[in-house]
Amino acid sequence: MYLKVVLIIDKRIEQSTKYKKILENTDITVFVASEFSSALKYMNDYEPDLILISDSMDFDIKKIIGQIRVLTYNIRPAIVALSKSDHIQDRIDILDSGADDFLSEPINNEEFKARINAHIRRSFESDFSEKTMLFDSKISYKIIKRILNDKQEWSIMLIDIDNLEFYKEIYGELAADKLLQTYSAIIKSAIDTNDYIGQLSKDDFIVITDNEKAEKIANYLVYAFDTVVSKFYSESDAKRGFMFMHGDDLAEDKVNLVTTSIGVISNKYRKYNDLRQVIGSLISTHKLAKYKTGSNYVIERPEISAENAIEKKEINNKILIAEPDEALSILLEATARLQGYNVKAVYEYDEIISAIQEYNPSIVILDAGNTETLEGLEICRKLKYDSVNLNINIIFTTTLHNKEMVLNAGADLYLPKPYELSVMFGWIKKFNENFNK
């Protein structure tokens, strides 16, 4: 999987072949260039971790080392000079020109191998995530760029944990880190030594594997994640199926439990030319998985063009107000209009569902109704368990101080009366932004 790449710049065929064979026995991919022009292409295509350059080349090695150091500034490979000279001044001059090491030939094979491995090991040491001990985005991007030049078929998986930030806010950073580490261990158990696992961000994993295994891995990860995730919640949250997020005053926001979403792309159905194209397609396909309810994976198919797979939706800033108190309803409607929302108000509970179907709002402000009949609770249940209305955000207002009953009915926010208008519209803004993402 091109985890370690060494470029040898040496016009001596026999000697470069010897070094190549030594290093390839230690799971290092080795490229050999006998000319500087071909060496530049390898540097651009594969971003080697280490460059071995011999003074047998027909140029001033010190000058070329300086040029390589400038050309590879962003990837910062280790540069090791090979020379038959053992003069101390030659060593000093080459090290001053930008080389990291100087090896005098002939050199013992075992020492040669140990020195090269030591340099590569040091080049990776700063590119680990402290939480998961996986390679970070710098290495992950480098590996993706390398496989773009490979004739083999490959699949790339972008994996993340949805609602992790909310989980962290409620249960704390240590608990969130433990969840991230556990999922990292699950992913590692699903792949083999020929696969690559790393991270694109602190909460996103990336796996590179072959096409035959990709869907099996994704299917296993969804199953395994959902199997273990309940252990990271309190008994009441796990049983209830959602978390409480404390808001302003006495408001309670309902937050879904964490899930995993996985997007998978491959070069089986389309050709990728550069890193930007790969990442754009990977993110687009991953978004399709996030749009689904619960843990899911989406695999790029021939009929899906990931760059255009996600239809741009228009901004929905419609609010439906179902408030039997006419004075309060008028106040809410006027304030919402002043803030740029489109608003519709209904006063009868038997009109709410038909009004929603006709108006298609992003947010419904729903009052519980009479404390004896609680018509609003039944309306809330119908809305949330009707698949057509699953994406609507319901702000439930009531004088009944029973947040668990309200949130179990399907409300997204429990907001007891009396409330401040600033609190109400703070939540409206939040829900509307999330709905339109």
Image: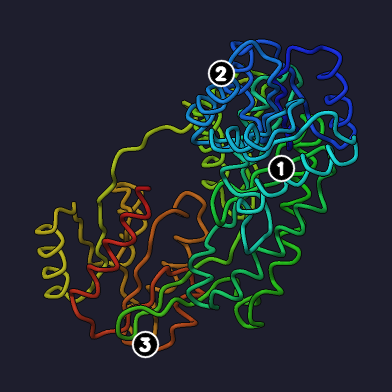
Q: Is residue 384 above or below residue 122?
A: below
Q: Which residue sits at x=74%, y=41%?
A: 196
Amino acid bearing label 1? Ile
Quarter of the rendering containing residue 421? bottom left
**Residue drawn at (51%, 42%), measured in percent from left and top?**
287
Total count of labels = 3
Q: CA distance from mark 1 to mark 2?
A: 28 Å
Would you name the residue on which mark 3 appears? Answer: 400
Q: Which residue is mark 1?
A: 120
Disc with the residue nearer the chain's start (3 vs 1): 1
If you read the primary sequence from the N terminus, does the residue marked by circle 1 or circle 2 appear first? 1
Label 1 CA crowd tier, 10 Å (few <14, some 14–19, many 20+)? some
Residue 344: % across, % down:
20, 56
Q: Is residue 218 above or below residue 394?
A: above
Q: At 74% from the left edge and 12% from the top edge, which residue is drawn?
A: 11
State the separation of the CA atoms marked 3 and 2: 60 Å
Residue 314 makes an appearance in the image: yes
- Residue 220 in the image: state x and y as whole percent: 78, 49
Q: Which residue is mark 2?
A: 273
Tag 1's secondary structure?
A: helix
Answer above or below: position of 180 versus 356.
below
State yes or no: discs 3 and 2 in contact (Cβ < 8 Å). no
Q: Type of residue at label 3? A: Leu
Amino acid type for the residue under numbered disc 2: Asn
Q: Is residue 143 left or right of residue 410?
A: right
Query: In the image shown, does 292 or 333 lie closer to the viewer?
Result: 292
Q: Position of residue 333 (x, y in %)?
A: 14, 63
Residue 437 spot, x, y in % from top left: 38, 48
**How many other residues sit within 10 Å of disc 2, few (<14), some (14-19) or many (≥20)?**
few
